[in-house]
Image (spheres, rainbow, N blue to C red):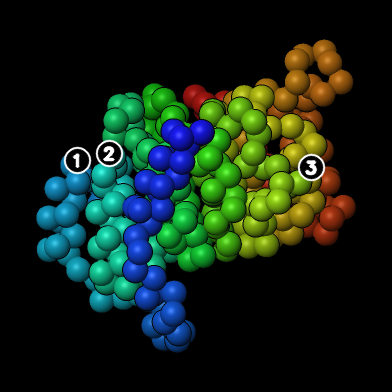
Amino acid sequence: MPKRKKVDDEACRLAGSRRSRRNVVISKADRTVHDFDLRGHAKTPDALKCYLRDHRAQTTFWAIKTDDFPRGCMQVLLEHASDQEACIQRFVNEYGKVYKYHLQNPELKALVKGHGEWLTHLQMTPMTGAPSPKLQGCGYRWTAQHTKILQVLEISLRHDVKRQLLDLTRRNPLRLECLQEIILWDVGSNTTIEQLLALVTRAKKLRRLVLYDAELGEKGDNNSEDGSSLARILECKAKEAGNDILLVEIMEQND
C-alpha cells in the first residue's frame, strides 16, 4: 500500500500545481493547435528542457509527438506547459525496443491527470519489434477516469491483467461519447467479448476498432471466436445500436 501511494503522489506532483489554464475562457479563434515534434529531442530531460526553451509556442493547445521519452521528460513537458498556460490536446508516443525510453506508468498518469479534460488523442504506437510498455493497473484506471473527450485512443493492453480499461461497469469508466477510433495492441486475453460488445453498443461515434493479437477464449470453447466472425459480431451489434459506420479489424502483430 505505501508503494502505491508513493507512485500516486509522484503522478500528482508531475501534473503540476498551477491550474490557471483551467480557468481561461478560450474563444473559437484561439483554438489553434501548435505541433511539437519532440522526436529525437528527448533523449534526456535536460535535452528536452533545452529544446523547449528554444521553441516556445504562442498558442493555447499543443499536439505532442515523441519517440524516446525516458523518465523525467514528462515532468519537463508538463512544467513547460504550465508556464505557458497551455493545454496538451494530442499526445503521440512512438515507442521502440528499449524499455527505459518508454513512457513510464507514473508519467502516463501525470499526463491524464493534468490534461485529461483537454486530450482528444492519446496514442502509444509501437515501432517494429518493440515490446509493450510496462504499464500498471493504475495507469489504465487513471486513463479511463481522467480523460473526458478522447477521440482517438491507442494503447497496449499487455499489462491490463484485471481488464480495467474497458470495464464499463466501474465507478469511473472510460468516457465513450467522443471516441471515433480505438487501437488496442497486445490484447491477448485481457478483455472479453462481453466488454467489446458493451463498447461498440455505447460508443455511438466509433468508426474504427482495431484489435491486435486478441485471444478471446480457448479454441473450441463457447467464448472462442476467430477474427472474421468476431469482427462481424461486433459490427452487427454496433449497427443494432444505431452505428452502421463501424469497421472492426482483427490483426496480428506482424501484419
Residue at image mark 1: 43
Res. 208 mark: none
User: Between disc 1 and disc 3, whose residue precedes?
Assistant: 1
Residue toward you, 67 or 116:
116
| Residue pictured at 82% horizontal, 24% vertical | 223
Q: Which amino acid, by three-letter code, is at mark 1?
A: Lys
Cβ–Cβ below 8 Å for labels 3 and 2? no
Res. 70 mark: 2
Residue at image mark 3: 197
Q: Is mark 3 on a helix, strand or loop?
A: helix
| Residue pictured at 16% horizontal, 54% vertical | 49
Quadrant in the picture for residue 160: top right
- Of badges 1 and 3, nearer the viewer stands 1
Q: In this view, does 146 lie to the left or right of 61?
A: right
Quadrant in the picture for residue 207: bottom right
Cβ–Cβ below 8 Å for labels 1 and 3? no
Q: What element carries label 2?
A: loop
User: Between disc 2 and disc 1, whose residue precedes?
Assistant: 1
Spot occupied by residue 43 in the image (x, y as percentages of width and height): 19, 40
Q: Which amino acid, by three-letter code, is at mark 3?
A: Leu
- Of badges 3 and 2, nearer the viewer stands 2
Spot occupied by residue 62 in the image (x, y as percentages of width and height): 35, 65
